[in-house]
């Protein structure tokens, strides 16, 4: 499929939107296209609404990658806790705690959700006391 090219001097908003779609089209799957088509109920009319739509799309993609990295960090702690290496478990827990705090400060997840997850991981990582 040949992608049409546009001049950068073009000030037509339609050309910019098409360039934006074509630039990001390569990295999206069919399910993502359907998801985005269902989200956008109406086209924005004002320039500020158009800008907000573009910003929202950028933020959504960024948040998705950060949320995925957060889940991976938490999963690494759980896998390390199942193993025998205490140093690796402690390091994974330290990194996951840092990522959870960062996500909570950026409102990616709720601060109580971050605290709850850290508490559960700490309980999992801490050495078991004999009863």
Image: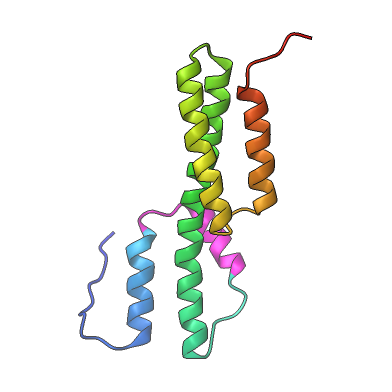
Left or right: 4, with 51 as reference point: left
Quarter of the N terminus within the rendering: bottom left
**Foreground: 86 or 52?**
86
Which range of residues does the magenta coloring cover? Answer: 26-39
Q: Residue at x 71, y 13 (%)?
A: 129
Vertical arrangement, residue 98 with respect to residue 63, above or below: above
Vertical arrangement, residue 10 with respect to residue 130, above or below: below
Residue furthest right in the image: 131
Q: Residue at x 51, y 51 (%)?
A: 102
Quarter of the C terminus within the rendering: top right
Q: Residue at x 35, y 56 (%)?
A: 26
Left or right: 75, with 13 as reference point: right
Q: Position of residue 62 (x, y in %)?
A: 45, 57
Q: Position of residue 84 (x, y in %)?
A: 52, 11
Q: Please tell me whether residue 27 belongs to the stretch shown in magenta.
A: yes
Q: Position of residue 118 (x, y in %)?
A: 63, 38
Rendered image quadrant of residue 44: bottom right
Number of labels in the image equals: 0
Residue furthest bottom in the image: 46
**Foreground: 3 or 60?**
60
Q: Residue at x 55, y 34 (%)?
A: 74
């Amino acid at each position: 499929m040949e992608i049409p090219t546009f001049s950068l001097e073009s000030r037509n908003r339609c050309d910019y939107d098409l360039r934006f779609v074509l630039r990001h089209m390569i990295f999206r799957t069919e399910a993502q296209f359907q998801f985005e088509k269902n989200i956008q109920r109406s086209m924005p009319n004002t320039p500020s609404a158009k800008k907000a739509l573009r910003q929202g799309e950028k933020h959504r993609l960024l948040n998705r990658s950060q949320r995925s990295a957060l889940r991976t960090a938490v999963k690494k702690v759980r896998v390390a806790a199942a193993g025998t290496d205490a140093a690796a478990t402690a390091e994974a827990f330290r990194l996951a705690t840092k990522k959870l705090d960062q996500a909570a400060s950026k409102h990616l997840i709720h601060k109580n959700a971050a605290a709850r997850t850290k508490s559960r991981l700490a309980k999992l990582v801490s050495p078991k006391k004999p009863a």
